[in-house]
């Protein structure tokens, strides 16, 4: 290299300033100058934004995601907690009924701590941390129109500033091309990556959908005054797939002395946005504890509903000839039924996989994008198998019913849940898998199998394990 010539720093473009997009930008910043392209104008603080309509519903980050967040952005969860979030001990700080109608005992012997807060708060802290990096540039109110390049390599993305529509009408006014060594699609469930790839002459993408037909209704409440000075537990009643329709709900205490209450129901048993029916729906779950907790509380705002809850996956990692310079992450690859709470955890783990892969192979290497796509597929597959293994049991969820092996595995998981509900060692193994910290083979470890086979066999709880003090603070 000639003296005085500074080598060009690689460039990357991330489509979407979602949590996935921001985490991807953070992962890439050590290796490239990053431009984040976002259709919306982002809020300045913890406020709702148009591009994340699901933000009003209950969210949490499993312990596997907490570890990934802090590995990628050290101290991030501590900052969320400083702004009112909480690291809740699972199951010590949680009252939970499993899908097979077994109540978990509140063991505190496991290491699992989930991050609990509003989605608006998490996104705000994440934006502030990532966008403060001088290596990352944000282009707001800018629409990605299409990819540039061909079937062998993506070289950039065509954008339009200030466009309110994502359709390309042939008018080049306000358009330009952002050249990049890597383009990352983190645009969510509405991703147009399959179409963009075929427009470049690339392959069609295999997709699968498993739709349990779940609808969600959420309302925000002011927390009971007596419950504001204690760490009131999360309360979760999961739906039973053996019953149709399946109904469940969760109470999530969050910052600002508020409770997010999200109710869910499958086909024929969906909650609505009728204020007069919300508490009644909660009282008529298989256990009425959620309704009892909220029936006397002051609601804050209207009820928000959604039906966009299908598990949908695109198998980009299976493409034999994947173009260099292009990567798809987050909900653009796989979206999950929100009841399992795995979306944010997978987003963090995928970004970590990108960073770790780039640490071995720098940007611009032939075949790198394919390696990145396959690395990101591992946490995607773990969450997908957990969600689909449960949702495929609902009537009408999929055209392909579970085969014999899948049904046998589902019965084993039910048995593992029953064992974990009564035994702390088995619970730790179960949570290792549910939190996406360990693969599903962890369920076949001695920590699970020995208690499953020989005990100790403590009786199942007959109701939600709220303490007398918790009931007194919350139930009039």
Image (cartoon, rainbow, N blue to C red):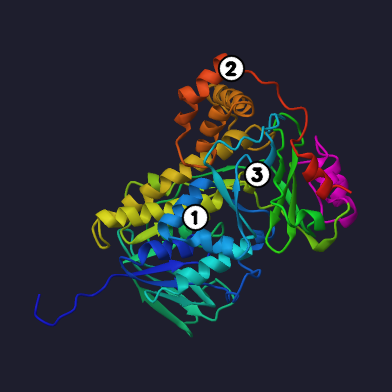
The span shown in magenta is 267-295
**In the figure, is residue 85 to the left or right of 220?**
left
In this rendering, does residue 440 appear at all? yes
Residue at the spot of label 2: 455
Closer to viewer: mark 3 or mark 1? 3
| Secondary structure under the numbered disc 1 in the rendered image | helix
Tell me which numbered mark, 3 or 1, is placed earlier along the sequence: 3
Of 381 and 392, which appears nearest the observer?
381
Closer to viewer: mark 1 or mark 2? 2
Crowding at mark 3 (Cα within 10 Å: few <14, some 14-19, many 20+): some
Q: Residue at x 72, y 30 (%)?
A: 101
Q: Is residue 451 above or below residue 14?
A: above
x, y percent for residue 384: 52, 41
Crowding at mark 2 (Cα within 10 Å: few <14, some 14-19, many 20+): few
Q: Residue at x 39, y 77 (%)?
A: 134
17 inside magenta stretch: no
Query: Alpha-carbon distance for marks 1 and 2?
Result: 40 Å
x, y percent for residue 393: 64, 31
Residue at the spot of label 3: 93
Tell me which numbered mark, 1 or 2, is placed earlier along the sequence: 1
Residue at the spot of label 1: 330
Q: Residue at x 60, y 52 (%)?
A: 60
Query: Alpha-carbon distance for marks 3 and 1?
Result: 29 Å
Query: Alpha-carbon distance for marks 3 and 2?
Result: 25 Å
């Amino acid at each position: 290299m000639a003296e005085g010539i500074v080598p060009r720093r690689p460039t990357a473009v991330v489509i979407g300033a979602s949590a996935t997009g921001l985490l991807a930008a953070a992962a890439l910043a050590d290796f490239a100058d990053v431009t984040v392209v976002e259709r919306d104008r982002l809020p300045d603080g913890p406020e709702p934004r148009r591009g994340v309509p699901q933000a009003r519903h209950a969210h949490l980050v499993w312990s596997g995601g907490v570890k990934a967040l802090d590995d990628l952005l050290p101290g991030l969860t501590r900052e969320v907690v400083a702004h009112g979030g909480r690291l809740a001990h699972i199951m010590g700080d949680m009252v939970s009924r499993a899908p097979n109608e077994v109540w978990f005992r509140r063991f505190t012997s496991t290491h699992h701590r989930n991050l609990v807060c509003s989605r608006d708060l998490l996104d705000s802290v994440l934006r502030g941390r990532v966008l403060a990096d001088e290596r990352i540039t944000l282009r707001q109110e800018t629409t990605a129109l299409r990819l540039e390049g061909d079937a062998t390599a993506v070289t950039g993305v065509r954008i339009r500033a200030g466009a309110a529509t994502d359709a390309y009408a042939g008018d080049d006014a306000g358009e330009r091309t952002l050249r990049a060594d890597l383009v990352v699609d983190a645009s969510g469930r509405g991703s147009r990556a399959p179409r963009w790839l075929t427009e470049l002459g690339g392959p069609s993408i295999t997709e699968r959908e498993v739709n349990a037909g779940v609808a969600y209704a959420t309302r925000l409440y002011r927390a009971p005054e007596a419950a504001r000075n204690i760490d009131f537990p999360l309360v979760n009643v999961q739906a039973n797939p053996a019953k149709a329709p399946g109904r469940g709900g969760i109470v999530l205490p969050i910052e600002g002395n508020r409770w997010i209450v999200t109710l869910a129901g499958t086909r024929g048993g969906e909650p609505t946005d009728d204020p007069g029916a919300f508490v009644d729906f909660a009282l008529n779950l298989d256990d009425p504890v959620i309704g009892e907790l909220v029936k006397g509380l002051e609601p804050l705002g209207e009820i928000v509903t959604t039906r966009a809850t299908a598990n949908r996956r695109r198998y980009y990692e299976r493409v034999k000839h994947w173009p260099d310079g292009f990567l798809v992450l987050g909900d653009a690859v796989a979206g999950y039924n929100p009841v399992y709470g795995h979306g944010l955890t997978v987003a963090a783990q995928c970004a970590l996989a990108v960073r770790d892969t780039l640490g071995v192979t720098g940007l611009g290497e032939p075949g790198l994008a394919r390696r990145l796509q396959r690395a990101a597929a591992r946490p995607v597959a773990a969450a997908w198998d957990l969600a689909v293994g449960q949702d495929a049991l609902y009537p009408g969820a999929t055209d392909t019913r579970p085969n014999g092996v899948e049904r046998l595995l589902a019965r084993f998981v039910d048995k593992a849940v029953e064992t974990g509900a009564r035994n702390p060692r088995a619970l730790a193994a179960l949570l290792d898998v549910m939190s996406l910290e360990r693969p599903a083979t962890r369920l076949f470890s001695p920590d699970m199998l020995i208690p499953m086979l020989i005990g100790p066999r403590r009786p199942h709880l007959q109701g939600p394990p709220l303490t007398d003090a918790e009931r007194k603070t919350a139930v009039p």
